[in-house]
Image (cartoon, helix red, strand yellow):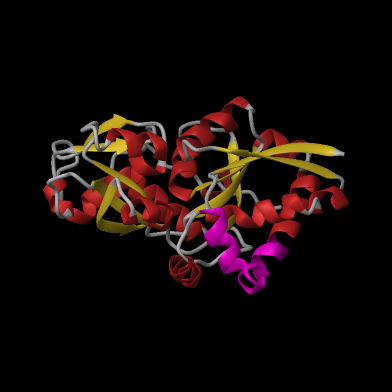
Amino acid sequence: MTKLHIGGVPEHFNLPWYLTLRDKAYHEKDVNLRWKDYHGGTGQMCKALRSGEIDMAVILTEGIIRDIVEGNSAKIIQVFVKSPLIWGVHVAKNSTYRQVDDLRGTEAAISRYGSGSHLMAYVNAENEGWNMEQDLNFTVVENLAGALQMLPEGNGDYFMWEKFTTKPYVDNGPFRLVGECPTPWPCFVIAVREEVLSSNATAVQSILEIINETTKEFKNIPGIDTMIAERYDQKLEDVRAWLELTEWDQKNLTAEEVNEVQQKLQQLDLINTTLPVEEILYDL
């Protein structure tokens, strides 16, 4: 049996993986797939892919493309969620900031450099017309739990994270939502180390077949909204709103999408060069 390790954030987007793992669906294809939660998000997973700690990752598109350009020997094999990720711009509930433009020149709390919370702070700044050099400052808080603790203490002024994940902390404190910033591209992709693609492509293909069958029917699973609400401590109406907005996918990124992300990252001075599409994508 082929043993592979996959990482992802412990959020509702990844519930299809939990369901297939719970049902031991991969064992039927002679694959022992082991899941690892990464609370630190994309930056932490990029590091884990580079070190070989995990073989695959369900990871933010812009984060993994940037890391591949910077030398991560992984390839994107498929889009996982094709709809945009809606990043909430959060401040502490006790903060005096009331709108996004109040945050110009303040300190963004990020999980780590290279993470989605880091990269999307640049996208948000561009949307707002800020000066990238003067108006963006960062402090590392490691993960959502770190931000929940540190923002009310005055360590960092705002924190960007997926808005439905943080909704309970907006409803009940200690966060307040002051704005939103959707990604301009499909939000989650599946990336695999090149070494694994060379040695275990058949197993990776089997994994895709199983997860794709699940995501195609995910919204139609009876009671799935209640399951998500209970598992992720969400209000039922918020889960239903999220399900309406979210679309999974079973195809890879297009060349146009890859180039759009690279051009945006280069425009924001987050990468110094771009790569040919075939050095980023891998078609099984």
Confirm whether the magenta stretch covers residue 225.
yes
Q: Is residue 200 above or below residue 12?
A: above
Left or right, residue 74 beside residue 107: right
Position of residue 28 measured from the top left corner of the image (x, y, whole percent)? 87, 52
Q: Is residue 49 above or below residue 183?
A: above
Q: Is residue 120 visible?
A: yes
Q: Quadrant of the N terminus?
A: top right
Left or right, residue 264 beside residue 50: left
Q: Can you tell which quarter of the image residue 274 is in?
A: top left
Over which residues does the magenta segment extend? 212-232
Position of residue 159 measured from the top left corner of the image (x, y, whole percent)? 30, 43
| Residue placed furthest toward the front | 172
Position of residue 140 measured from the top left corner of the image (x, y, whole percent)? 33, 30
Could you tell me which residue is drawn at 62 percent across and 62 percent down? 251
Q: Main secondary structure of the magenta part?
A: helix
Could you tell me which residue is drawn at 48 percent across and 65 percent down? 239
Confirm whether the magenta stretch covers residue 210.
no
Could you tell me which residue is drawn at 70 percent across and 56 percent down? 19
Q: How many marks?
A: 0
Position of residue 87 measured from the top left corner of the image (x, y, whole percent)? 35, 54
Q: Is residue 114 visible?
A: no
Left or right, residue 61 beside residue 149: right
| Residue placed furthest toward the top | 51
Q: Is residue 247 above or below residue 164?
A: below
Q: Is residue 190 above or below residue 136?
A: below
